[in-house]
Image (spheres, rainbow, N blue to C red):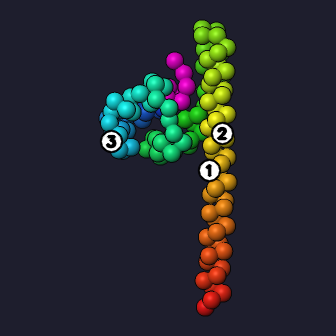
Amino acid sequence: MSGIGFNIRKLREKKGFSQEYIAEKLGINQSTYGKLERNISNITLDRLYKIANVLEEDIITLLNISRESTFFNQANQGNGHVETTQNDFKIIIEELKLTYEKMLVIKDEQIDFLKNILESK
């Protein structure tokens, strides 16, 4: 077992939180949250940020898969699983980049707005 859901579960258990507690903090039911941990449901970037916030962890920590975990999956499930995991990371990284770029545009717009306010006074 590996992937983002597994990492989330390990961190949740390490913190001593129940699935019900995390689900409540996210505003979802426990069944839906359980599917995220079991990698049955896809985790959106927004939800991943929220989970990281509840767990008081950096989002990178949730995305981390150790070399040992990758080797174990490669040995037991073949390259397909490892390749799928790598593709999932590529998608998430691209989403992170797009989100970052959007945040930079918003920041620039806010700076321009504030400059205009200061100039009008």
Q: CA distance from mark 3 to mark 1?
A: 26 Å
Instruction: Give the farthest residue toward the top.
Output: 76
Disc 1 target residue: 99
Q: Is residue 33 visible?
A: yes
Look at the numbered disc 2 and give the secondary structure of its residue.
helix
Q: Quadrant of residue 32?
A: top left
Disc 2 target residue: 93
Q: Quadrant of residue 109?
A: bottom right
Relative to residue 117, is residue 103 depicted above or below? Answer: above
Look at the numbered disc 3 and give the secondary structure of its residue.
helix
Q: Tell me which amino acid carries mark 1.
A: Thr
Would you say 6 lies left or right of 27 here? right
Look at the numbered disc 1 and give the secondary structure of its residue.
helix
Disc 3 target residue: 24
Badge nearest the viewer, 3 or 1: 1
Instruction: Give the farthest residue toward the bottom.
Output: 121
Q: Tell me which amino acid carries mark 2.
A: Ile
* Image x and y of residue 72, in percent: 61, 13
